[in-house]
Amino acid sequence: MSEEVESSRVPAYDSSAFECPYCNVYAVQDWERLTWPKMDGGKFWKGWKWSKCQHCQVLTLWSHLEKIVQPDSVPFGPDPNPDMPKNVLDIYEEARRVLPVSVRSCAALLRLALQVLIETLEPGRGHINQKIRRLVERGLEPSAQKAMDVLRVVGNNAVHPGSIELEEDGELVPALFGLLNLVVHHVISRPRQIEALFDSLPESARQAIAKRDQPTRRKSKPSSAAAQLPSPDSVKEVVPA
Ligand SMILES: [Zn+2]
């Protein structure tokens, strides 16, 4: 089966036929707009629809964001990085569940997940913004810093009046999942992988490295001092004006 035919079987908004999420049969779908009884006063957002499977006759509920709300067995967004801490993961999964209904809630939850992750890296006082700055000072990868800032800014826009129209850009909020995974990769997975590789070195090699990096007290040869990078301030002192 070609890739094109394969993708046409995946449930899609307004598609005339797809593989039903209930009976798994590729079947014709009848579409109907969702209306709410007038007595209730409320109404669904424009764009909410049912699709009815002609094979099993069961209804699938679609939101105005053109995503399936019911059945909720299809999780949205990419799978989480397996190294994601449990308290961050719980919020990540919650964000996946609300994505088809509210991109603002989803963005706000992903920002919260980032905040919880940052708390574990940089506990103590300060706003998320100040903590990101401290992490940058500690050597945070620039791409991880940018990913954190996108999550922070977009998430802030979801809860405060801002200049980003989240629903207008259908790609922005779903992309935040990938950014959070990227942050976890940089701050947890990669250091962990490098640590494991380092630990796999022969004992003698690790001892030699530890000896090399011991602070030298008696020796005052400049060679050992030169191995340490000077701080930007000390560079200023030696550079003639
Ligand atoms: Zn069906």
Image (tube, rainbow, N blue to C red):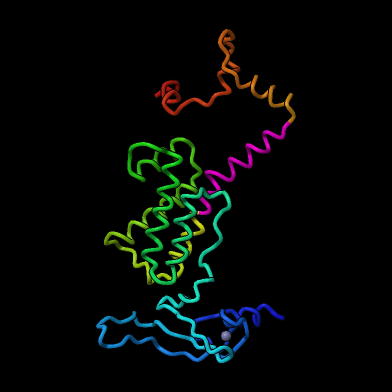
- For residue 10, above or below residue 235: below
The residue under the point 65% across, 82% down is: 5
Is residue 160 or residue 85 the one in the foreground?
A: 85
Residue 199 image offset from top left, x and y in percent: 68, 33
Q: Which residues are magenta?
A: 181-201
Is residue 21 or residue 8 the one in the foreground?
A: 21
Residue 84 image offset from top left, x and y in percent: 53, 50
- For residue 185, above or below residue 40: above
The residue under the point 38% across, 72% down is: 168
Q: Quadrant location of the C terminus?
A: top left
Q: Main secondary structure of the magenta part?
A: helix
- Residue 193 is inside the magenta segment: yes
- For residue 96, above or below residue 185: below
Q: How many marks?
A: 0
The residue under the point 58% across, 52% down is: 82
Quadrant holding ligand 1?
Answer: bottom right
- Residue 105 is inside the magenta segment: no
The quadrant holding residue 44 is bottom left
Left or right: residue 200 versus residue 95 is right
Report if residue 45 is visible in the image: yes
Q: Quadrant location of the N terminus?
A: bottom right
Is residue 84 or residue 37 the one in the foreground?
A: 37
Report if residue 16 is visible in the image: no
Left or right: residue 119 versus residue 160 is right
Residue 63 image offset from top left, x and y in percent: 42, 78
The residue under the point 60% across, 41% down is: 192
Residue 183 image offset from top left, x and y in percent: 50, 49
